[in-house]
Amino acid sequence: MIDLFKNIIDLTAEMRRACDADSLNNAFRALLACLGPFAHAAGTVHKTRRDERYLIDTTYPAHWMEHYTRNNYQNIDPVIDPVNHGLTPYNWDQAYICNADQKKIMNEFRDVGFQAGHAIPLHLTPGMLLLVSVASPEKEIDFQTQALIQLIVGQYHTRYCQLAMLITYDEKPLMTERERECLLWVAQGKDTTEIGAILSISDNTTKYHLKNVMHKLGCHNRVQAVVRAIQLGLIYP
């Protein structure tokens, strides 16, 4: 166990040196491989809005992910529903199953070879979490392994946030006041329609401003834009 822990610490240092998202995800995969035959999914999850769940990285089989997304399981998956679990790590068998569709998802997880899992949620913004769920072919993930997974995910979260700070002060993109207002309301958990109503602008205008912000910040979605803007000191939610 001591040798394993040392090896993990060494690999964690490599993760902390990752210069972009791809190298960070590759380092994270290598770390998990040291612990066992695990698969994982990392993504951003809004605390209350099920339609704002974005995948960052996964090692789940391609056929499973195709089936998962085709059936919009991300909207009903009990494992990634933070409302049911709070903000502390939890096991899959602690997931609250409230209907037949959710029970079906869990059964299908097992059918493709995932018997147990452990999930760790960490804050990105007031309304958004980084959630990493690790799946195992074994019937349970022991306590020591869970503790190591939590350590690894904590470092992944740290570097994920740090990567948003790599733009230097002189390279900070200029944002218009309206773009800043829109992004601030995104950080507070508001959707397009709500932002438009608050600012007395149309949905299309709201989308236009947020699209410009994402382009300026080099982000693919609103959540990433909020995280990067906060780290750069462009907004203060």
Image (cartoon, rainbow, N blue to C red):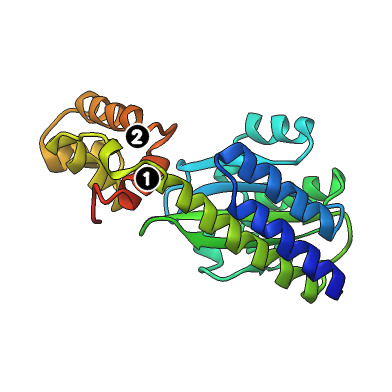
Q: Which residue corresponds to the image point at 86% horizontal and 57% vertical from the top-left?
A: 36
> For mark 1, what is the residue?
228
Residues 85 and 33: in front is: 33
Left or right: where 187 falls relative to 146: left
Q: Secondary structure at mark 2?
A: helix
10 Å neighbourhood of mark 1: few (<14), some, or many (≥20)? many
Q: Which residue corresponds to the image point at 43% horizontal and 56% vertical from the top-left?
A: 124
> For mark 2, what is the residue?
217
Res. 65 image quadrant: top right
Name the mark on residue 102.
Answer: none
Amino acid bearing label 2:
Leu
Q: Earlier in the sequence, mark 1 or mark 2?
A: 2
Left or right: where 216 falls relative to 206: right
Disc 1/disc 2 C-alpha distance (Å)? 7 Å
| Vertical position of residue 202 compared to residue 198: above or below | above
Q: Which residue corresponds to the image point at 67% horizontal and 59% vertical from the top-left?
A: 12
| Vertical position of residue 134 compared to residue 206: above or below | below
10 Å neighbourhood of mark 2: few (<14), some, or many (≥20)? many
Amino acid bearing label 1:
Arg
Q: Secondary structure at mark 1?
A: helix
